[in-house]
Amino acid sequence: MSDVVGDGYRFDCPACGESLEVNDSMKLALVEQGCVVCGASVTAAAFTELPATDRP
């Protein structure tokens, strides 16, 4: 069961390979602050929108 509220995305860090499901606010934070694991810069290309069926 998914707890993603609103927009849901899969984040895949291009530097370290970390993969997370994130919501819209977490996506913005990652783009502004970088990967939480390795600190690499993150662009919108690192996110894939999850299908609507994975959202509540």
Image (cartoon, rainbow, N blue to C red):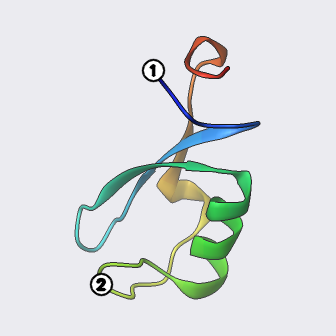
Q: How many labels were placed on the picture?
A: 2
> Of helix, strand and loop, which one carries label 2?
loop
Q: Which residue is mark 2?
A: 38
| Vertical side of 18 occupied by 1: above or below | above
Quadrant (top left, top right, bottom left, bottom right) of the N terminus: top left
Which corner quadrant of the image does residue 38 belong to?
A: bottom left
Q: How far is disc 2 from disc 1 in space, using C-alphas?
A: 28 Å
Residue 39 image offset from top left, x and y in percent: 39, 88
What amino acid is at disc 2? Cys
The disc label shown at residue 11, or none:
none
Which residue extends farthest left? 16
Extreme residue in the top direction:
53
Image side of residue 31 versus residue 18, left or right: right
User: For the residue marked with disc 1, what is the amino acid?
Assistant: Met
Q: Is residue 50 above or below residue 38?
A: above
Tell me the crowding category of disc 2: few under 14, some 14 to 19, or many 20 or more residues within 10 angstroms, Cα based.
Answer: few
x then y, percent, for residue 45: 55, 56
Mark 1 element type: loop
* Residue located at (23% from left, 71% from top): 16
Residue name at image x 24 percent, y 62 percent: 17
- Between 51 and 25, the one nearer to me in the picture: 25
The C terminus sits in image quarter: top right
Look at the picture and state if 20 lies above or below 26.
Answer: above
Residue 51, position as x, y percentages in the image = 59, 19
In this rendering, which labeled residue sits more in front, label 2 or label 1?
A: 1
Residue 1 shows which numbered tag? Answer: 1
In this rendering, position of residue 24 left or right of residue 37:
right
Which residue shows up at 72% across the image and 52% down it? 24
